[in-house]
Image: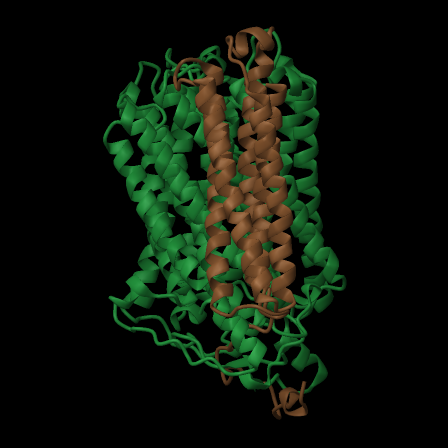
Amino acid sequence: MTDATTEAAHSTGSAVAPQAEDPTAFGLLSTADHKRIGRLFIGFSLLFAVAGAVTDVLVRFDLASDSGHTVLNLETFTQVFMFTRDALVFGMLIPFFLGVAIYIVPLQVGAPNIAFARAAALSFWGWLVSFGVLVGAYIGNGGPAGGWDDGVRLHMLALAGLVISLIVGAICVAVTTLAMRAPGMYMDRTPPFAWSALVMASMLVVSLGVVLGQLVLLYIDHGYGRHFLDGNYGVWPRIDWMYRTPQLFIYVVPVLGVAAEIMLAAARRWVFEPLALYFTMGLVGLFGFGAWANFGIAGEGADVVDGLEGIVLVGLYAGALAGVGGLLALLGFTVWQSRKWPRPTTAVLAAFGAGKLIAVAALIGLIGAGVDWLNIAGRGVDGNAPLRFTTWVTGQQSLLIYGAGLLGVLAALHWWAPKIWGRRLSELVGWASFAAIGGGAFLAWLGPTLSGAFTEQPQFVYNDPQLTTVYGSLTDSSGAEGLSVVGGIGVVIVLAGVGLVVLNLLVSVGMGKGAETDADPWGGLTPEWLLDSPPALGQSDSLPQLSSGTPLLDAELNGSAAPAEREASEVPA
Amino acid sequence: MSETAVSTVEAPQPGRYTVPGPPPRPRSQLVGTGFAIAAVSMAVAGALGHYMARRHLLDDPGHDWLAGQSVPNPQLVYALITLLVSVVTAHWAHWASRRGERGHTWVGMAITLVMGFAFFNMVMYSLNRMEIELGAGEWENLAFAVTGLSLAILIVGMFYLGLMTLRSLGGSVGRDRSTPLGSAVFFWDFAVLAWAATWYVVYVVK
């Protein structure tokens, strides 16, 4: 529904006819229904998670030799390394939670559809096409470190397409939360996940916007003389900040929302101070803004931020840690207040694990930033690499993407599968997925973290003389090979866990083996559990009467009735 | 809200409520435009930041950086003044639209768009006089990219204004129906600000 239509309907008080949805697969191409768009995002992002984990296995095992490249060669190593980051961040992490938000947030805030539904559809198709072009650029020997110049620029165009598409989707989610909430549901009563989606969307808009401006400059300079790029390798250090901490914290803010939803439902209580819930999640998003970090990596303006960079990084990690720690303490206190130990479902376990891992990642980030800032153990002086240039960063990425990110994916899928597909996923397979992803992520973190801390293995590439000055000045030290094997084994286990998740979806949902559920199989608190599982395609002409983000809890505590539906004609002008 | 709107049923029974209808708040386009402005402003900030960081690396920016280029300041200043006036006429159009005065609305938007075209005419003239050759040097590349980004934002702004003008021509005027035009004017304000920042950094400070 266009904004003009909604505005006209609003101003006249007339009902809007339900939007017809073609239920066939062909209807997916022209759909403007948030439920189908959300499902498309979720499905494809899981496929890209598999692709990213497979290529990461290649990278990790290629690093496990002291005699040069064994699995890949010099050119393909850098390209596969970069594709892995693209696939895991822009293929999986951001689009998965954006897809869940596009599906769930309108149901949670009492909106008929996502804001600018056709723009949301454009966001999905733009993302998918851009990702296809990006893969094509890599296959054609392009990408930031490729040998085909046109392919390098094609990668930049594809990356710009990905960023624009995700920004458009993020705007749709943010506007839905801000401007399409049901009357009476004020911001301090929005469900936790809707709030976390708003935080992520807002921060994506402001942080990914930066890379758009950078890509314009990089594209022009790359095509006309390369006066500051220093060759194809100059592209990556200037966009690397999107794939590392603190920026990664923005991408996992929705994981905190998922964890809060699940833990509060398990406790059957609302937090004693709702503003603290929203504030702590906002803190994590705010301190995750990492666009400025490229100056320290690319060398441009490094002398300006020298001296400041260390303390700023320490401050960012400390802020993120305060946010996550505060939120987890709040949730833990609420569970303790309920005097009930939550039933260990996959969703509960994964939510608990994901939340904890974000806190651990922030703590480790704080330690690493402190070591670099204070030059502990000679880090950053006398030619020693600061930790932020070593595989210490790969460890952080593993912790946040594989650990917190994938466990958040697992929790969200198990929790909302009844609402999204109308069936529960297998708990047995879910526990196995939880064990594999959690254990694999631990090893994937442990190996590179130890090799970064004790062998100064560069984070970027292995023994590559053609690198930019910053990375090229760092040399690999022996002893990292065995630790790379540990990390590689971890990623293999993670890959098995992701495979189990996909298998679980195929069997439980695709083949219809999962148990069918009623509207609220988990005893959820938030408004989406008032609706059928799954809600019918398209939109109706009635609005729910909501005055808080937890109508089912309100009804339970008050011993009163659940809110009734309201006709659109009764919407006040 | 009527009493029937808050009627309740006897017990919580999930699953009985249909997916809701039209949103109750009419300003989603304005909020969406605000987010778009945030994204684009960060893109401009990122580009200008990169430009300034590169310039900062040079010891003698005034000489090496510009490599003998002379900037036609009067024309670029006139162009900026034209844009600033167009902001006034755009707000005049929006003010008139909220009062339901269609004649003023359309005249205001027409003048705004004409001034936008005039601005592009002046800027293109200025850039042609400067004879910036793409690829000739670092400053040329960066100036071209940053200037092009700002001009592209202005083109999007003019397109947005034009579309919303067509909507007002179709009858979308009045206090409750001027939000789309107001959103376009909001974006135009930002586009002009983005150009002003670009002009100051690239052509005044250089």
Chain painted green: A
Location of residue A120 with respect to B159 vertically, above or below: below
Which of the pair A527/A109 is nearer the observer? A109
* Residue at x 41%, y 21% (from the top left corner): A221
Location of residue B39 with respect to A559 vertically, above or below: above
Residue found at the far right of this picture: A273
Q: Position of residue A334 (x, y in %)?
A: 71, 62
Q: Position of residue B5 (x, y in %)?
A: 63, 87
Chain painted brown: B
What is the quadrant of the N terminus of chain A in the image? Answer: bottom left
* Residue at x 63%, y 40% (from the top left corner): B84
Which of the pair A528/A28 is nearer the observer? A28
Which of the pair A420/A207 is nearer the observer? A207
Res A31 quadrant in image = bottom left
* Residue at x 50%, y 85% (from the top left corner): B16
Location of residue A22 with respect to B70 vertically, above or below: below
Q: Position of residue A572 (x, y in %)?
A: 63, 80
Res A483 quadrant in image = top left
Q: Position of residue A209 (x, y in %)?
A: 52, 40
What is the quadrant of the C terminus of chain A in the image? Answer: bottom right
Mark yes or no: residue B177 visible.
yes
Location of residue A147 with respect to A19 vertically, above or below: above
- Left or right: A486, with A260 as reference point: left
Mark yes or no: residue A292 visible.
no
Which of the pair A498/A160 is nearer the observer? A160
